[in-house]
Image (spheres, rainbow, N blue to C red):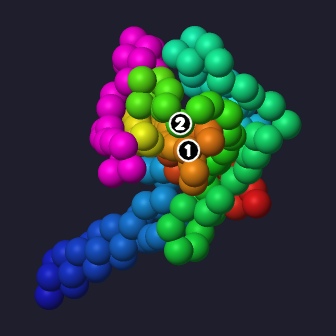
Amino acid sequence: MIAFAARAFAALFALLTLAACTTKDETMTTVPIATLADTQAQVQSRLTAIITELATAAPTAAHDPATAKIGPAPCGDNGPEYQVTATDSVLLDGAQHRNALAVLGEQLALQGYTSITSRQFSDGVGGELNLRTGDGYTATISSGKGNHGLAVIVASPCYRTPDGDYPG
């Protein structure tokens, strides 16, 4: 009887240990850890590279760096995970959008981006390019309303801060 009680206690102990090791906090450690400053620097660097390549693809494009916005946003419903998103725009005549997007897609493919989707809008002028990198960063370059320019959006994958708190 004592051996049975010892085995039952060992099984119960193992079950409780397993349950304790799979709490929500433990499962969240699968999300990579990065500081907000590091993630913002990565997103800003990628945004700058895309704007630079866009200027090569469409030399008449006009850009004002003051229009760029960057900041954290939550990933999922709640919890400490965050991603950083940056937005910017480039003024470019609509007649040049499709060619610029095609050339930009080719240039960014050489830098490790993979095209998720590329489409032309039904207006005969505008289009959109959606890209991803191997490490989970995404970029969308799209004709804006009225085809007066291109919107550029870069987003990081989800991260957790080293202290586990949401940085926003």
In the displayed structure, 157 sits above or below 1; it is above
Identify the element where label 1 is drawn.
helix
Residue 156's spot in the image, x, y percent?
55, 42
Circle 2 residue: 94
Q: Which residue is mark 1?
A: 147
SS class, disc 2: helix
Residue 48 appearing in the image = yes
> Left or right of 24: which side holds 45?
right
Q: Quadrant of the N terminus?
A: bottom left
Residue 143: percent from the left, percent from the top? 51, 43
Q: Quadrant of residue 15?
A: bottom left
| Residue 99 x %, y % | 42, 23
Report the span colored magenta. 102-124
Whether pointer 2 and pointer 1 mark residues with C-beta atoms closer than 8 Å, the reply is yes
> Is residue 19 depicted above or below 131 in this figure?
below
Residue sitting nearer the eye, 70 or 65? 65
Q: Is residue 42 left or right of residue 67?
A: left
**Residue at x 62% of width, y 42% of height:** 148
Q: Say few, some or many: other residues with alpha carbon within 10 Å of mark 1 (under 14 / 14 to 19 / 20 or more).
A: some
Determine which quarter of the picture holds residue 151. top right
Location of the C terminus (image quadrant): bottom right
**In the image, what residue type sits under mark 1?**
Asn
Kind of residue sitting beneath label 2 = Gly
